[in-house]
Image (spheres, grey):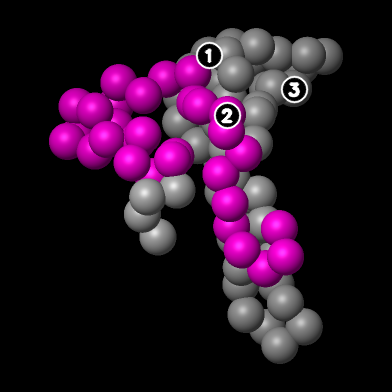
Amino acid sequence: MPTVASCIDLVVHLAIDRDGTRRVVEIAAPTGSTTDAAVDVEAIFTRRRGDLLPTGARPARTAKFLAAGLDPEIVLAGGAR
């Protein structure tokens, strides 16, 4: 299972509203650990009162984002929508 966990950068959890619209409910990142054959994740963004807000947690691995020219801190700090 650690091999699978190392291949996942982010998990985006979607839900379908009553009107059929898909909404992001949570964005999580693997912690690098596993428990009972399940990949452990930590919520990076969660939906609260209709808004998708940062939790303050940071993904364990940001090198791929930085290599692509993306600064995750801008988004994680709530500076981009």
Residue under the image location 46 percent in, 31 percent down:
9
Asked if the residue under mark 1 is in contact with the one under mark 3, i.e. CB atoms within 8 Å, the reply is: no
30 drawn magenta? no
- Residue 70: image location, x then y, percent: 24, 38
Residue under the image location 39 percent in, 45 percent down:
75
Position of the C terminus, as image quadrant, is bottom left
Q: Which residues are magenta?
A: 48-77
- Say whether disc 2 or disc 1 marks the residue closer to the N-terminus: 1
Asked if the residue under mark 1 is in contact with the one under mark 2, i.e. CB atoms within 8 Å, the reply is: no
State the image quarter where residue 57 is shown: top right
- Residue 16: image location, x then y, percent: 70, 72
- Say whether disc 3 or disc 1 marks the residue closer to the N-terminus: 1
Could you give the CA–CA distance between mark 2 and mark 1, rounded to whole angstroms? Answer: 23 Å
Above or below: residue 8 compared with residue 33: below
Q: Residue furthest right?
A: 36
Above or below: residue 56 compared with residue 23: above
Is 4 positioned to the left or the right of 68 in the image? right
